[in-house]
Image (cartoon, helix red, strand yellow):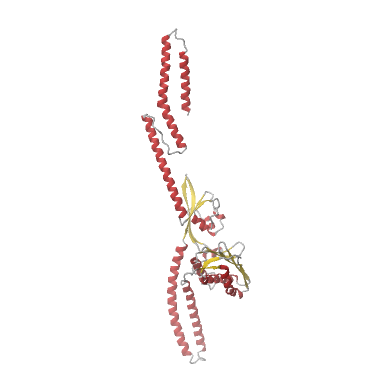
Amino acid sequence: MRLKWIFILIVLILVCTVATTFMIPTEDDPTLSWVTRGSCGLALLLMVVFYINIMKPLRSITNGFDLLRAQDFSSRLTHVNQHEADRIIDMFNRMMNSLKEERLHLREQNHFLDLLINVSPMGIIILDTDDRIVNANPSAANFLGFSKKDNAGGRKLDTLDSQLGHTLAALQQGEVRTVRLNDSMIYRCSRLSFMNQGFAHPFILIEKLTDEVMKAEKKSYEKVIRVIAHEVNNTMAGVNSMLSTAGTILQEHPKENADILEVIGVCEGRCAAMSNFITSYADVVKIPEPTLITTDLNREIDHWHIMLESLCAGRNIKLHRKLCHESVKVNIDPVLMEQVLINIVKNSAESIGSDGEITISTAPSPPTLTITDNGPGISEETAKMLFSPFFSTKVNGHGIGLLFISEVLHRHKCKFSLSTATDGLTRFTISFTNG
């Protein structure tokens, strides 16, 4: 634009000069007058040539810069019928075409990545430099317990009200950690980064390993239990046969062999206990597939109430029911779910010991069952080991109860968690997603 105005100023000066020249009297020196006039005409002609050969290509190039500034990669420059200028214009048009194709390729690539991220079973969370959530795909939102109405954008990981959120907040850059949470879920969490506009942007990958780990664990302990059960049962059968035979012989003189008969009785009792112990483990791997029926959860709890009260009666523990007024429709196997609730209440009663309270409550939307007790609670270290195969905090515990509960609830496709809240109460929460 500056060259344009300079050119216009030169033309105006030249025009004024020519006009002045033509106004000079020609009587004194007509030759000088015609020379002056001819020079001015030639200057005008040269200015026209200058405009055609210099200003027009410059204006075309300036238009190209305007297109670049506006990022309009679809427009092209036209030739000005000058060899050198047209070469520059051709090169510019090729560059614009390359930029257009590159932008189209990036848009297609970004669209593909967006689709891939949205349908990925792996949770992906993109963070800013202050560890605030910029974006989270549906899998990550599901892992963290966000509903469609929730907006995680702008929130920090350590403000998320979930054990997984606290675990992610503790991750260091480049760290990969596998965790088992208090809802029996197992995740592999990785904190990585990618470069964008010269800056490193952190992001987190969450891979759900629950199904794979549980299948591997189940396959391992099923084989171990079968081998142990086979060996123990065969051994116990032989020992019981020998003890029975020895007892029969010694019964011929019961008074003389009273002490030995007592020892044999103790041994037989111990063998029976060992067989029952192994059988209880074997029963875990023989859990049948649930036969689902649609029923009212509140009504089922009323049916189970007498059995549940019997677990608390001898400990002076009060069992309360706080069932919602609405019908809570769920698809469950009543037999398996009754056994689950018996195990949970039994564990709560044993945790309390005596003189406590257990409350069973329900909610309709989503269908939820919560068992709350005022026992001593669960420590953070214990919470990390919950639902691990055969883990137990009891002196004589076998770790079968929680294993059975986890197996049945997973088969019902339920979400569940066991934790002690800040109010000191321990809650086992079960959400029925198939209601």
**x and y percent of residue 395 in the render?**
54, 72
Residue 380 picture quarter: bottom right
Q: Is residue 45 visible?
A: yes
Q: Is residue 428 visible?
A: no
Which residue ends up furthest to the top in the rendered image? Answer: 28
Q: Residue at x 41, y 15 (%)?
A: 38
**x and y percent of residue 172 in the render?**
50, 54
Q: Viewer-proximal residue, 98 or 425?
A: 98
Q: Viewer-proximal residue, 401 or 3?
A: 3
Task: Classify 304 as above or below 119.
Answer: below
Q: Residue at x 42, y 31 (%)?
A: 60
Residue 376 vs residue 389: left or right? Answer: right
Which residue ends up furthest to the left in the rendered image? Answer: 83
Residue 366 picture quarter: bottom right
**x and y percent of residue 87 in the render?**
37, 32
Task: Classify 73 as above or below 293.
Answer: above
**x and y percent of residue 180 in the render?**
50, 62
Q: How many marks?
A: 0
Q: Residue at x 46, y 65 (%)?
A: 214
Q: Viewer-proximal residue, 191 or 290?
A: 290
Q: Residue at x 42, y 19 (%)?
A: 43
